[in-house]
Image (cartoon, grey):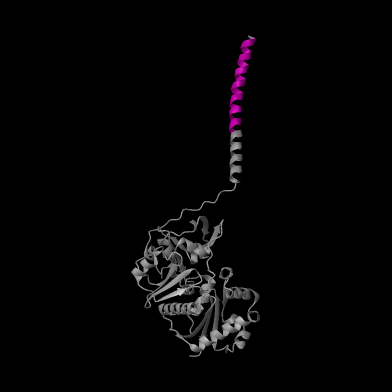
């Protein structure tokens, strides 16, 4: 009898305890899982770069990477060849007031590495100047975060929101890229730059992260006086083309304004400390030493020009409008730019004055407008 009661009580206890143990195991396991997940979420995540959608190669993008000879066979001889401080030979093409192209030929490979387009494209392409921002964003997938491998190194390019709004990047299947520059005023594309990945890395257009040093943008070669003259002619072509596009009164080169620009250049070079604040002085001295890779931006508008500089250069302040900028390394940068740079160059491009003179030396450009009609 005792034995039978013992087994009956044992069974009852077993029936009661077993579910309790089962439930305890579940809650304990859940707790461990939560802790494990919590611990995992606190671990640093490796950065994942979204896959960049590359679109069908079209328009001038097809010529990035082709030989100089092949490009010339299709487009003919340029109107001018400009030697620059960028290890690039710039070739200018212009078809009346409809199309302007500045084609960059890599000095070492003799291949097309960059093309700036102003006005109409000579080839059919959905990417074109005059395109509105919303339309471009609807038509093309934009590259925002990408990795590029070049010369046995990997670099990551990241576009911030300002980049996307003012100079969005498009990737093509042939490995080339296009940057569209938007006007701050019209919100339309005013210039398109096609370039290869090496130029994209060198350009400084976007934030670049790399474990190893990136290729330097500028060479240490000093331009000859002839090279400086051709740069001025190139700048003249861009100025007159853009003014024709916007239907602004055309310019005429003035000997008086040119002489003023030269006097200002010489006076400033003789004693820059006398006329420039510390930050601007540092940039100017680097320009004059041809240390372009160390220069940020030097830009002086008429209100920034020292009255003492004009007096010492024997310049009538009320008559002349003076601008100083550097480094200026190719003519297209007057248009293919954004932000404050764009505002600065627009003042020069679309001045109501029409008589103009230039001085260009050590990648430093001085522009003078004569207000007297």
Q: Is residue 26 above or below residue 158?
A: above
- Whole-percent x and y of residue 56? 38, 59
- Is residue 13 found left or right of 223 in the rendered image? right
- Whole-percent x and y of residue 293? 56, 68
Q: Which residues are magenta?
A: 2-26
Report whether residue 88 is seen. yes
Q: Is residue 13 magenta?
A: yes
Residue at point 60%, 73% (across, down): 286
Q: Which residue is at the front of the view, 204 or 187?
A: 204
Quadrant the N terminus occupies: top right
Q: Is residue 73 magenta?
A: no
Residue at point 56%, 57% (across, down): 212
Q: Is residue 34 above or below residue 252?
A: above
Q: How many marks?
A: 0
Location of residue 207 by image quarter:
bottom right
Location of residue 130 by image quarter:
bottom left
Q: Which residue is at the front of the view, 352 or 120?
A: 120
Report whether residue 370 is seen. no
- Whole-percent x and y of residue 54? 42, 57
Location of residue 72 by image quarter:
bottom left
- Whole-percent x and y of residue 177? 44, 62
Q: Outermost residue toward the top?
A: 1
Q: Main secondary structure of the magenta part?
A: helix
């Amino acid at each position: 009898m005792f034995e039978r009661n013992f087994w009956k009580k044992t069974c009852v206890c077993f029936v009661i305890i077993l579910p309790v143990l089962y439930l305890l195991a579940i809650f304990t396991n859940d707790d461990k899982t939560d802790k494990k997940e919590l611990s995992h979420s606190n671990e640093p995540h490796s950065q994942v770069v979204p896959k960049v959608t590359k679109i069908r190669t079209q328009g001038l993008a097809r010529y990035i990477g082709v030989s100089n000879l092949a490009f010339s066979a299709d487009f003919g001889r340029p109107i001018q060849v400009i030697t620059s401080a960028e290890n690039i030979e710039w070739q200018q093409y212009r078809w009346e007031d409809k199309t302007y192209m500045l084609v960059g030929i890599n000095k070492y490979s003799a291949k097309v590495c960059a093309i700036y387009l102003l006005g109409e494209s000579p080839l059919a392409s959905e990417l074109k100047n005059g395109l509105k921002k919303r339309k471009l964003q609807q038509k093309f997938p934009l590259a925002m975060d990408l990795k590029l491998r070049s010369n046995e190194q990997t670099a990551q390019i990241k576009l911030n929101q300002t980049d996307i709004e003012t100079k969005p990047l498009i990737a093509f299947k042939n490995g080339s890229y296009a940057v569209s520059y938007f006007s701050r005023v019209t919100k339309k594309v005013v210039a398109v730059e096609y370039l290869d990945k090496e130029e994209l890395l060198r350009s400084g257009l976007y934030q670049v992260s790399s474990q190893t040093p990136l290729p330097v943008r500028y060479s240490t070669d000093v331009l000859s006086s002839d090279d400086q003259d051709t740069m001025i002619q190139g700048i003249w072509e861009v100025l007159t083309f853009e003014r024709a596009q916007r239907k602004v009164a055309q310019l005429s080169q003035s000997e008086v304004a040119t002489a003023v620009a030269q006097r200002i250049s010489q006076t400033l070079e003789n004693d820059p400390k006398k006329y420039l604040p510390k930050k601007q002085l540092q940039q100017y001295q680097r320009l004059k030493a041809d240390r372009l890779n160390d220069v940020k931006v030097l830009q002086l508008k008429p209100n920034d020009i020292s009255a003492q500089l004009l007096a010492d250069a024997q310049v009538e302040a009320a008559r002349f409008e003076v601008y100083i900028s550097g480094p200026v390394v190719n003519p297209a940068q007057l248009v293919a730019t954004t932000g404050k740079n764009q505002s600065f160059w627009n003042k020069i491009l679309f001045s109501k004055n029409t008589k103009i003179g230039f001085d260009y030396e050590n990648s430093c450009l001085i522009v003078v407008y004569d207000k007297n009609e």
